Image (spheres, rainbow, N blue to C red):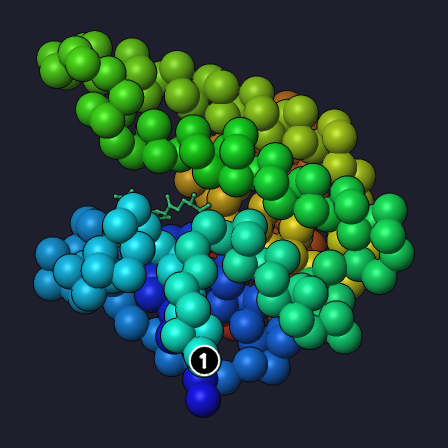
């Protein structure tokens, strides 16, 4: 029995793919996204009305969406994966960080990518203003993240875990890494360390060629 991961190249499904591999769980992927009309988007829409990836179907047919929830679930399911740290306080911080990214960063990416969903205005300049505002807030929220969640040497401790994997994926969009390279260079060193780690690098290469 295998997991089914709905995803797309360069999308948030990369973080869940790393999580599944670290847990040693078998999965098959189905390419689906709203921006690829030739993908399995209708099939995805039937199980996740948000029509968003990542969406994961568990072997018993349970549908999971929301990248942070999926990664927390995997970390609890396979504790030896170290997706979540062992100690109660470190685990609490990791869960806090995962929800922080979902609530304050991934959400702003959705506004950047689809500004027309967040305003009743329809002119190009008005939409561009929504996008610019979302980016400014996104970059500010990542600075707060970088100042709040310390890495030693990884955000999850000795080895990279769910928090590292979601952060390294979601920082790839909307000019975040270029911004953080200027304002939080130490944090960008952590991101690059995770990018290069053996647990994540093969998946990231498939998604981003780098
Ligand atoms: N809240 C979701 C957001 C997922 C999301 O926005 N995924 C993007 C791809 S990276 C997507 O599928 N967007 C398509 C759309 O919203 O139409 C999560 O944290 O996983």
Q: Secondary structure at mark 1?
A: loop
**Residue 131 shown left or right of residue 156 in the figure:** left
The residue carrying pointer 1 sits among few (fewer than 14), some (14 to 19) or many (20 or more) residues within 10 Å by Cα, namely few
Residue in the image at 66% along x and 71% along y: 77
Quickly name the residue at label 1.
59
Say if residue 79 shows up in the picture: yes
Q: Position of residue 177 (x, y in %)?
A: 53, 37
Residue at 76% in and 75% down = 80
As displayed, is residue 135 above or below residue 3? above
Q: Nearer the viewer, residue 61 or 73?
A: 61
Left or right: residue 106 compared with residue 36: right
Spot occupied by residue 185 in the image (x, y as percentages of width and height): 68, 33
> Residue 107 placed where, x, y %?
43, 33
The quadrant where residue 3 appears: bottom left
63 left or right of 196? left
Would you identify the image quadrant in which residue 2 lies? Answer: bottom left
Residue 153 visible in image: no
30 displayed left or right of 138: left
**Residue shown at 53% from the left, 59% from the top:** 70
The quadrant in which the N terminus is found is bottom left
Q: How many marks?
A: 1
Q: Is residue 147 above or below residue 136?
A: below
Vertically, is 79 above or below 109?
A: below
Mark 1 beta carbon near ligand 1 (under 8 Å): no
The residue lying at 12 percent from left, 15 percent from top is 122
Where's residue 31, x and y in %?
Answer: 26, 67
172 vs 111, nearest the viewer: 111
């Amino acid at each position: 029995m295998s997991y089914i991961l709905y995803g797309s190249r360069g999308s948030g499904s990369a973080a869940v793919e790393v999580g599944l591999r670290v847990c040693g769980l078998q999965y098959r992927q189905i390419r689906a996204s709203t921006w690829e009309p030739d993908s399995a988007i209708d099939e995805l829409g039937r199980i996740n009305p948000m029509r968003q990836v990542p969406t994961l179907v568990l072997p018993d047919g349970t549908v999971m969406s929301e990248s942070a929830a999926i990664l927390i679930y995997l970390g609890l399911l396979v504790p030896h994966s170290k997706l979540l740290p062992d100690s109660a306080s470190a685990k609490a911080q990791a869960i806090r960080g995962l929800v922080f990214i979902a609530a304050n960063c991934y959400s702003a990416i959705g506004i950047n990518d689809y500004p027309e969903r967040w305003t009743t205005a329809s002119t190009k300049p008005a939409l561009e203003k929504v996008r610019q505002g979302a980016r400014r807030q996104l970059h500010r929220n990542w600075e707060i993240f970088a100042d709040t969640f310390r890495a030693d040497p990884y955000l999850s401790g000795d080895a990279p875990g769910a928090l590292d994997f979601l952060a390294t994926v979601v920082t790839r969009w909307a000019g975040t890494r270029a911004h953080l390279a200027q304002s939080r260079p130490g944090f960008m060193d952590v991101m690059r360390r995770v990018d290069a780690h053996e647990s994540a690098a093969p998946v990231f290469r498939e998604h981003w060629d780098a």
